[in-house]
Amino acid sequence: STIKDRYEMASSPFISLEFFPPKTEPGKRNLLARMERMTALNPLFITVTWGAGGSTADKTLELASLAQRELNVPVCMHLTCTNTNKLVIDEALKKAKEADIRNILALRGDPPVGEDWGFDEGCSEFSHAVDLVRYIKNQYQDEFCIGVAAYPEGHCEGEADNGLQDPKRDLPFLKEKIDAGADFVITQLFYDVEKFLDFEQVFRTEISSDIPIFPGIMPINSFQLFNRATKLSHASIPAKILDRFPPQIQSDDNEVKSIGVQVLTEIVDEIFARTNGRIKGIHFYTLNLERAIAQIVTNSSALSKILEEDNEDEVLDGDGDVV
Ligand code: FAD
Protein backbone atom coordinates (compact mmCIF):
# COMPACT_ATOMS: atom_id res chain seq x y z
CA SER A 1 0.00 0.00 0.00
CA THR A 2 1.04 3.62 -0.21
CA ILE A 3 2.61 5.68 2.55
CA LYS A 4 -0.19 8.21 2.15
CA ASP A 5 -2.86 5.56 2.84
CA ARG A 6 -0.96 4.05 5.77
CA TYR A 7 -0.38 7.52 7.24
CA GLU A 8 -4.02 8.40 7.10
CA MET A 9 -4.91 5.21 8.96
CA ALA A 10 -2.20 5.54 11.65
CA SER A 11 -3.74 6.42 14.98
CA SER A 12 -0.68 6.42 17.27
CA PRO A 13 2.97 7.48 16.90
CA PHE A 14 5.00 5.31 14.57
CA ILE A 15 8.45 5.05 13.07
CA SER A 16 9.86 4.50 9.60
CA LEU A 17 13.31 3.15 8.77
CA GLU A 18 15.96 3.88 6.14
CA PHE A 19 18.40 1.17 5.01
CA PHE A 20 21.16 1.15 2.41
CA PRO A 21 21.94 -1.82 0.14
CA PRO A 22 24.91 -3.85 1.43
CA LYS A 23 27.74 -4.59 -0.99
CA THR A 24 27.96 -8.36 -0.46
CA GLU A 25 25.59 -11.32 -0.62
CA PRO A 26 26.12 -12.29 3.07
CA GLY A 27 25.65 -8.64 3.97
CA LYS A 28 22.34 -8.62 2.15
CA ARG A 29 21.14 -11.80 3.88
CA ASN A 30 22.14 -10.41 7.31
CA LEU A 31 20.36 -7.19 6.60
CA LEU A 32 17.17 -8.87 5.44
CA ALA A 33 17.10 -10.90 8.65
CA ARG A 34 17.63 -7.72 10.62
CA MET A 35 14.92 -5.87 8.72
CA GLU A 36 12.57 -8.73 9.46
CA ARG A 37 13.34 -8.54 13.20
CA MET A 38 12.78 -4.79 13.07
CA THR A 39 9.27 -5.28 11.70
CA ALA A 40 8.47 -5.97 15.38
CA LEU A 41 8.76 -2.18 15.72
CA ASN A 42 5.83 -1.97 13.32
CA PRO A 43 7.35 0.63 10.97
CA LEU A 44 4.86 2.49 8.80
CA PHE A 45 7.28 2.04 5.90
CA ILE A 46 10.92 1.34 5.16
CA THR A 47 13.09 3.10 2.61
CA VAL A 48 16.07 1.89 0.59
CA THR A 49 18.68 4.40 -0.53
CA TRP A 50 19.87 4.93 -4.10
CA GLY A 51 23.55 5.55 -4.85
CA ALA A 52 24.05 8.91 -6.58
CA GLY A 53 24.29 8.54 -10.35
CA GLY A 54 22.63 5.11 -10.18
CA SER A 55 25.78 3.56 -8.69
CA THR A 56 23.73 1.10 -6.59
CA ALA A 57 20.82 0.72 -9.03
CA ASP A 58 20.86 -3.10 -9.17
CA LYS A 59 21.48 -3.56 -5.46
CA THR A 60 18.87 -1.00 -4.47
CA LEU A 61 16.26 -2.56 -6.75
CA GLU A 62 17.10 -6.04 -5.50
CA LEU A 63 16.92 -5.15 -1.80
CA ALA A 64 13.83 -3.00 -2.22
CA SER A 65 12.04 -5.73 -4.21
CA LEU A 66 12.98 -8.48 -1.74
CA ALA A 67 11.86 -6.37 1.20
CA GLN A 68 8.60 -5.50 -0.54
CA ARG A 69 7.95 -9.18 -1.21
CA GLU A 70 9.10 -10.70 2.07
CA LEU A 71 8.32 -8.16 4.79
CA ASN A 72 4.82 -7.07 5.41
CA VAL A 73 5.79 -3.40 5.25
CA PRO A 74 5.47 -0.96 2.33
CA VAL A 75 8.81 -0.10 0.74
CA CYS A 76 9.80 3.33 -0.51
CA MET A 77 12.66 3.34 -2.99
CA HIS A 78 14.91 6.40 -3.20
CA LEU A 79 15.72 7.58 -6.73
CA THR A 80 18.04 10.39 -7.85
CA CYS A 81 17.70 12.11 -11.20
CA THR A 82 20.92 14.01 -11.96
CA ASN A 83 24.28 12.72 -13.17
CA THR A 84 22.51 9.71 -14.62
CA ASN A 85 21.04 8.45 -17.83
CA LYS A 86 17.30 8.73 -18.34
CA LEU A 87 17.21 5.04 -19.26
CA VAL A 88 18.40 4.22 -15.74
CA ILE A 89 15.47 6.17 -14.32
CA ASP A 90 12.98 4.57 -16.71
CA GLU A 91 14.28 1.11 -15.88
CA ALA A 92 14.20 1.79 -12.13
CA LEU A 93 10.58 2.97 -12.22
CA LYS A 94 9.53 0.06 -14.41
CA LYS A 95 11.19 -2.52 -12.16
CA ALA A 96 9.86 -0.86 -9.02
CA LYS A 97 6.35 -1.06 -10.40
CA GLU A 98 6.81 -4.70 -11.39
CA ALA A 99 8.00 -5.46 -7.85
CA ASP A 100 4.85 -3.82 -6.45
CA ILE A 101 6.79 -0.97 -4.87
CA ARG A 102 4.30 1.87 -4.63
CA ASN A 103 6.43 4.61 -3.07
CA ILE A 104 9.35 6.61 -4.48
CA LEU A 105 11.46 9.24 -2.72
CA ALA A 106 12.29 11.60 -5.60
CA LEU A 107 15.68 13.25 -5.14
CA ARG A 108 18.10 15.33 -7.12
CA GLY A 109 21.33 13.68 -5.96
CA ASP A 110 24.75 15.26 -5.69
CA PRO A 111 27.66 15.48 -8.13
CA PRO A 112 30.61 13.17 -7.42
CA VAL A 113 33.07 14.73 -4.99
CA GLY A 114 35.39 17.18 -6.72
CA GLU A 115 33.14 17.70 -9.76
CA ASP A 116 30.61 20.38 -10.52
CA TRP A 117 27.42 20.29 -12.53
CA GLY A 118 29.07 20.54 -15.96
CA PHE A 119 28.90 16.78 -16.63
CA ASP A 120 25.19 16.26 -16.80
CA GLU A 121 24.79 15.95 -20.58
CA GLY A 122 23.08 12.52 -20.60
CA CYS A 123 20.11 13.74 -18.65
CA SER A 124 19.64 17.43 -19.17
CA GLU A 125 15.89 17.27 -18.64
CA PHE A 126 16.48 16.70 -14.91
CA SER A 127 18.23 19.44 -13.01
CA HIS A 128 16.26 19.46 -9.77
CA ALA A 129 14.19 16.95 -7.83
CA VAL A 130 11.00 18.67 -9.00
CA ASP A 131 11.77 17.51 -12.54
CA LEU A 132 11.71 13.91 -11.35
CA VAL A 133 8.45 14.44 -9.44
CA ARG A 134 6.88 15.85 -12.64
CA TYR A 135 8.33 13.04 -14.74
CA ILE A 136 6.95 10.30 -12.47
CA LYS A 137 3.54 11.98 -12.37
CA ASN A 138 3.56 12.32 -16.12
CA GLN A 139 4.58 8.71 -16.80
CA TYR A 140 2.74 6.95 -13.99
CA GLN A 141 0.01 9.38 -12.80
CA ASP A 142 -0.96 8.23 -9.30
CA GLU A 143 0.59 4.77 -9.42
CA PHE A 144 3.44 5.93 -7.19
CA CYS A 145 3.10 7.82 -3.95
CA ILE A 146 5.95 10.35 -4.13
CA GLY A 147 8.08 11.73 -1.31
CA VAL A 148 10.60 14.58 -1.42
CA ALA A 149 13.45 15.80 0.76
CA ALA A 150 13.45 18.92 2.93
CA TYR A 151 16.12 20.61 5.01
CA PRO A 152 15.09 22.10 8.37
CA GLU A 153 18.37 24.03 8.53
CA GLY A 154 18.48 24.82 4.81
CA HIS A 155 20.08 22.90 1.96
CA CYS A 156 23.77 23.57 1.50
CA GLU A 157 25.23 23.85 -1.99
CA GLY A 158 28.75 24.33 -0.65
CA GLU A 159 30.78 26.78 -2.68
CA ALA A 160 27.82 27.81 -4.81
CA ASP A 161 26.34 29.68 -1.87
CA ASN A 162 29.47 30.01 0.25
CA GLY A 163 28.20 27.30 2.54
CA LEU A 164 25.35 29.47 3.75
CA GLN A 165 22.19 27.60 4.63
CA ASP A 166 18.78 29.23 4.75
CA PRO A 167 15.60 27.18 4.93
CA LYS A 168 13.63 30.19 3.63
CA ARG A 169 15.63 30.16 0.40
CA ASP A 170 14.60 26.53 -0.26
CA LEU A 171 10.95 27.09 0.61
CA PRO A 172 9.66 28.11 -2.85
CA PHE A 173 11.42 25.08 -4.35
CA LEU A 174 9.95 22.77 -1.74
CA LYS A 175 6.55 24.25 -2.53
CA GLU A 176 7.19 23.58 -6.21
CA LYS A 177 7.81 19.89 -5.42
CA ILE A 178 4.56 19.66 -3.44
CA ASP A 179 2.62 21.51 -6.14
CA ALA A 180 4.05 19.06 -8.69
CA GLY A 181 2.36 16.24 -6.80
CA ALA A 182 4.65 15.10 -3.95
CA ASP A 183 2.64 13.38 -1.23
CA PHE A 184 5.01 13.50 1.73
CA VAL A 185 8.25 15.02 3.00
CA ILE A 186 11.21 13.41 4.77
CA THR A 187 13.68 15.79 6.38
CA GLN A 188 17.43 15.80 6.43
CA LEU A 189 18.77 14.61 9.79
CA PHE A 190 18.93 17.20 12.54
CA TYR A 191 19.72 17.41 16.25
CA ASP A 192 18.40 20.92 16.85
CA VAL A 193 14.71 20.46 17.64
CA GLU A 194 14.08 24.23 17.68
CA LYS A 195 15.22 24.49 14.08
CA PHE A 196 12.98 21.61 13.07
CA LEU A 197 10.00 23.15 14.88
CA ASP A 198 10.59 26.52 13.18
CA PHE A 199 10.76 24.78 9.81
CA GLU A 200 7.61 22.76 10.52
CA GLN A 201 5.69 25.89 11.43
CA VAL A 202 6.73 27.76 8.29
CA PHE A 203 5.93 24.71 6.18
CA ARG A 204 2.47 24.43 7.74
CA THR A 205 1.62 28.07 7.19
CA GLU A 206 3.23 28.63 3.80
CA ILE A 207 3.06 25.27 2.03
CA SER A 208 0.61 22.75 3.42
CA SER A 209 -1.32 22.19 6.60
CA ASP A 210 -1.69 18.48 6.09
CA ILE A 211 1.07 16.93 3.94
CA PRO A 212 2.92 14.41 6.16
CA ILE A 213 6.36 15.51 7.35
CA PHE A 214 8.63 12.77 8.67
CA PRO A 215 11.45 14.23 10.76
CA GLY A 216 14.71 12.40 10.00
CA ILE A 217 16.80 11.32 12.98
CA MET A 218 20.11 9.42 13.10
CA PRO A 219 21.07 7.50 16.24
CA ILE A 220 24.53 8.20 17.63
CA ASN A 221 26.58 5.02 17.33
CA SER A 222 30.02 6.52 17.81
CA PHE A 223 31.28 10.06 18.36
CA GLN A 224 33.32 9.94 15.18
CA LEU A 225 30.35 8.88 13.05
CA PHE A 226 28.16 11.48 14.75
CA ASN A 227 30.66 14.19 13.83
CA ARG A 228 31.02 12.94 10.30
CA ALA A 229 27.29 12.57 9.66
CA THR A 230 26.50 16.06 10.96
CA LYS A 231 29.29 17.60 8.85
CA LEU A 232 28.18 15.76 5.70
CA SER A 233 24.58 16.75 6.14
CA HIS A 234 25.35 20.26 7.43
CA ALA A 235 23.33 19.65 10.59
CA SER A 236 24.26 21.75 13.59
CA ILE A 237 24.77 20.22 17.03
CA PRO A 238 23.33 22.43 19.79
CA ALA A 239 25.85 23.13 22.58
CA LYS A 240 23.59 21.49 25.16
CA ILE A 241 23.84 18.22 23.21
CA LEU A 242 27.57 18.48 22.52
CA ASP A 243 28.13 19.07 26.25
CA ARG A 244 26.69 15.61 26.92
CA PHE A 245 29.75 14.12 25.20
CA PRO A 246 32.77 15.52 27.08
CA PRO A 247 36.20 14.71 25.51
CA GLN A 248 36.98 12.01 28.09
CA ILE A 249 34.08 9.84 26.92
CA GLN A 250 34.28 10.49 23.17
CA SER A 251 36.31 7.40 22.44
CA ASP A 252 34.20 5.13 24.66
CA ASP A 253 31.69 3.82 22.12
CA ASN A 254 29.46 2.11 24.68
CA GLU A 255 29.15 5.28 26.75
CA VAL A 256 28.57 7.40 23.64
CA LYS A 257 25.85 5.02 22.43
CA SER A 258 24.11 5.02 25.76
CA ILE A 259 24.12 8.83 26.03
CA GLY A 260 23.11 8.92 22.36
CA VAL A 261 20.01 6.85 23.12
CA GLN A 262 19.06 9.26 25.92
CA VAL A 263 19.61 12.31 23.71
CA LEU A 264 17.61 10.87 20.82
CA THR A 265 14.80 9.73 23.11
CA GLU A 266 14.50 13.29 24.41
CA ILE A 267 14.51 14.68 20.85
CA VAL A 268 11.77 12.28 19.75
CA ASP A 269 9.56 12.96 22.76
CA GLU A 270 10.03 16.70 22.44
CA ILE A 271 8.98 16.62 18.79
CA PHE A 272 5.78 14.74 19.63
CA ALA A 273 5.06 16.89 22.67
CA ARG A 274 5.45 20.18 20.81
CA THR A 275 3.70 19.45 17.51
CA ASN A 276 0.27 18.68 18.85
CA GLY A 277 -0.47 15.71 16.58
CA ARG A 278 0.89 17.35 13.42
CA ILE A 279 3.91 15.03 13.44
CA LYS A 280 2.79 11.43 13.64
CA GLY A 281 6.02 9.51 12.98
CA ILE A 282 9.80 9.65 13.16
CA HIS A 283 12.03 8.52 10.30
CA PHE A 284 15.23 6.80 11.45
CA TYR A 285 18.41 6.81 9.41
CA THR A 286 19.36 3.35 10.67
CA LEU A 287 22.80 2.97 9.00
CA ASN A 288 21.60 -0.65 8.88
CA LEU A 289 21.87 -0.95 12.68
CA GLU A 290 19.04 -1.94 14.97
CA ARG A 291 19.99 -1.80 18.62
CA ALA A 292 19.92 1.94 19.29
CA ILE A 293 16.60 2.30 17.49
CA ALA A 294 14.98 -0.49 19.50
CA GLN A 295 16.26 1.20 22.67
CA ILE A 296 14.97 4.64 21.67
CA VAL A 297 11.55 3.19 20.88
CA THR A 298 11.52 1.36 24.22
CA ASN A 299 12.56 4.46 26.19
CA SER A 300 10.43 7.05 24.42
CA SER A 301 7.14 7.72 26.15
CA ALA A 302 5.48 8.43 22.80
CA LEU A 303 6.95 5.55 20.79
CA SER A 304 6.96 2.81 23.42
CA LYS A 305 3.24 2.33 22.79
CA ILE A 306 4.36 0.57 19.61
CA LEU A 307 5.73 -2.26 21.74
CA GLU A 308 2.70 -2.75 23.94
CA GLU A 309 1.41 -5.59 21.84
CA ASP A 310 4.75 -6.89 20.59
CA ASN A 311 7.59 -8.87 22.03
CA GLU A 312 10.37 -6.31 22.36
CA ASP A 313 13.06 -8.93 23.10
CA GLU A 314 12.89 -9.96 19.49
CA VAL A 315 14.41 -6.73 18.29
CA LEU A 316 17.07 -6.22 20.96
CA ASP A 317 19.45 -8.46 19.07
CA GLY A 318 23.11 -7.79 18.37
CA ASP A 319 24.44 -5.23 15.92
CA GLY A 320 26.98 -7.19 13.89
CA ASP A 321 28.46 -5.51 10.85
CA VAL A 322 26.39 -5.45 7.70
CA VAL A 323 28.87 -4.88 4.90
P1 FAD B 1 16.29 19.65 -4.86
O1 FAD B 1 14.93 19.65 -4.30
O2 FAD B 1 16.44 19.70 -6.34
O3 FAD B 1 17.06 20.87 -4.21
C1 FAD B 1 18.46 21.01 -4.38
C2 FAD B 1 18.88 22.45 -4.26
O4 FAD B 1 18.45 23.19 -5.39
C3 FAD B 1 18.33 23.19 -3.05
O5 FAD B 1 19.32 24.09 -2.62
C4 FAD B 1 17.13 23.92 -3.61
O6 FAD B 1 16.84 25.08 -2.86
C5 FAD B 1 17.61 24.26 -5.00
N1 FAD B 1 16.53 24.25 -6.00
C6 FAD B 1 15.53 23.35 -6.13
N2 FAD B 1 14.77 23.63 -7.21
C7 FAD B 1 15.31 24.74 -7.77
C8 FAD B 1 15.00 25.51 -8.92
N3 FAD B 1 13.94 25.21 -9.69
N4 FAD B 1 15.80 26.58 -9.21
C9 FAD B 1 16.87 26.88 -8.44
N5 FAD B 1 17.22 26.18 -7.34
C10 FAD B 1 16.45 25.12 -7.01
N6 FAD B 1 21.19 11.24 -2.12
C11 FAD B 1 21.47 10.11 -2.83
O7 FAD B 1 22.33 10.14 -3.71
N7 FAD B 1 20.81 8.93 -2.59
C12 FAD B 1 19.82 8.82 -1.66
O8 FAD B 1 19.24 7.75 -1.48
C13 FAD B 1 19.50 9.99 -0.89
N8 FAD B 1 18.53 9.96 0.05
C14 FAD B 1 18.18 11.11 0.71
C15 FAD B 1 17.11 11.06 1.63
C16 FAD B 1 16.74 12.21 2.32
C17 FAD B 1 15.56 12.16 3.27
C18 FAD B 1 17.47 13.43 2.12
C19 FAD B 1 17.11 14.66 2.90
C20 FAD B 1 18.52 13.48 1.23
C21 FAD B 1 18.89 12.34 0.50
N9 FAD B 1 19.93 12.35 -0.43
C22 FAD B 1 20.22 11.20 -1.17
C23 FAD B 1 20.73 13.56 -0.64
C24 FAD B 1 20.17 14.50 -1.76
O9 FAD B 1 20.33 13.88 -3.02
C25 FAD B 1 20.97 15.79 -1.66
O10 FAD B 1 20.72 16.44 -0.46
C26 FAD B 1 20.84 16.75 -2.83
O11 FAD B 1 21.86 17.73 -2.69
C27 FAD B 1 19.53 17.51 -2.91
O12 FAD B 1 18.51 16.70 -3.24
P2 FAD B 1 16.98 17.27 -3.24
O13 FAD B 1 16.16 16.18 -3.76
O14 FAD B 1 16.66 17.90 -1.97
O15 FAD B 1 17.16 18.41 -4.38
Image: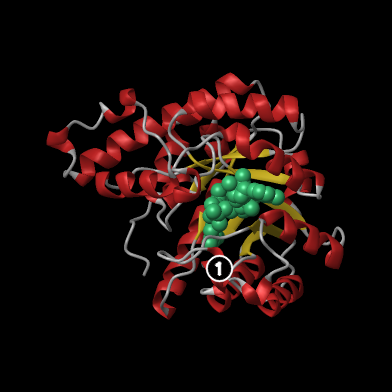
Image quadrant where residue 115 sits: bottom left
- The x, y position of residue 41, in whole percent, is 54, 47
Q: Residue at x 43, y 39 (%)?
A: 235
Q: Is residue 235 rendered to the left or right of residue 104?
A: left
Q: Residue at x 26, y 28 (%)?
A: 244
Q: Is residue 67 rendered to the left or right of residue 161?
A: right
Q: Which residue is drawn at 65% across and 20% down?
A: 276
Q: Is residue 317 above or below residue 168?
A: below
Q: Give the residue at mark 1.
A: 118
Residue 249, can we see it? yes
Other-residue count near label 1 (Cα within 10 Å), few / some / many at <14 / 14–19 / ≥20? few
Q: Is residue 22 rendered to the left or right of residue 221?
A: right
Quarter placement of the C terminus: bottom left
Q: Is residue 130 rendered to the left or right of residue 257?
A: right
Q: In this view, does 265 lie above or below 183?
A: above
Image quadrant where residue 167 sits: top right
- The x, y position of residue 63, in whole percent, is 56, 71
Residue 42, can we see it? no
Hey, what amino acid is under mark 1?
A: Gly
Q: Which of 133 and 8 is in front in this view?
A: 133
- The x, y position of residue 231, in whole percent, is 36, 45
